[in-house]
Image (cartoon, rainbow, N blue to C red):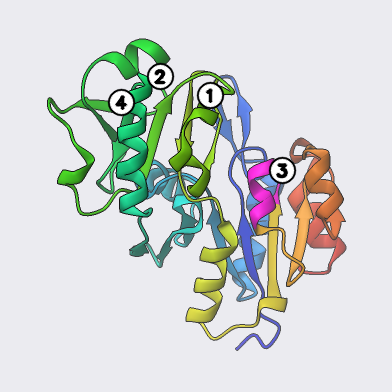
Amino acid sequence: MNNNKKYFFFDIDGTLTMPSRGSATVPQSTLKALEILREKGHFVAIATGRSYGMAINVMKDLGFENMVHDGGYGITLNGQLIDIEPLDRDLCISLIHECDREGFPWGIQPENSDTRFVPDERFMEFTHDKYMKSRIIPGLAPENYDVIYKCYVACYAGEEQRLESLKKLPWCRFMKEYIFVEPADKSRGIKRIVDHFGGDYKDVVVFGDERNDLSMFSDEWTCIAMGNAVQELKDRADYVTTDISDDGIWNACAHYGWI
């Protein structure tokens, strides 16, 4: 039994993986660090904003069995999906109705999959999106679904301010042409996992590089920013390691004596 067990949570892009010739690769030093952490009995997991359907294959490809996903509203343990909390259904319905009135193309994700549902071709024509698949459902209405995990609204920066319902929902913009209405609190899922194992929050360690990782940079545990991280994250970090391409995860783990 490891009495000094830590709970490690890693963001994906820019933290675990780096672009390489059009695909993502994990530095060899990171793979070795993860191997040692597992051998020493520590818990290791991914913490991502991606939906389960968009992240499950990435999780497996990277050799993980545990994951916080859906922006902190979903958890997977030992390769098994435990739960995904949906967004507020009534607010999502109100948002879609506002989109119709404002003329904004939209999509919803009412299933645990890698596909958004759209009522017609307008969303694809506006966004030319390749991030995920879209399925046209003629007559699509959010009221017909018991749960909604994510919504997508096609509009340019600033136009979303016309949507009153959006002020009560979590959202972010990764693409110029549309916004993601999705959970954005990775710490929520992290705490659920640690509680599940009866662990202590002080034994949590998180690694990140982008603004969407701010939600898991908490004073309750150790927060490590990659050298390639945005300055806002570095300012919140307990430790700033080297770039992902310069053995960042390995160097941070060695600095703290975890490997």
Residue at image location 53% in from the left, 49% down from the top = 48
Q: Earlier in the sequence, mark 3 or mark 1?
A: 1
In the drawing, does residue 117 fall left or right of residue 191?
Answer: left
Q: Are marks 3 and 2 in contact (CB under 8 Å)?
A: no
Q: Earlier in the sequence, mark 4 or mark 1?
A: 4
Q: Which mark is residue 226?
A: none
Examine the residues drawn in magenta and state their main secondary structure: helix
Q: Which residue is under mark 2?
A: 129
Q: Earlier in the sequence, mark 4 or mark 3?
A: 4
Q: CA distance from mark 2 to mark 4?
A: 20 Å
Q: Amino acid at mark 4?
A: Asp
Asked whether residue 51 is in view, the answer is: yes
Q: Which mark is residue 175?
A: 1
Magenta stretch, residue numbers: 208-215
Label 3 Cα neighbours within 10 Å, binned few <14 / some 14-19 / many ≥20: many
Q: Amino acid at mark 3?
A: Asp
Q: Nearer the viewer, mark 4 or mark 1?
A: 4
Q: CA distance from mark 2 to mark 1?
A: 9 Å
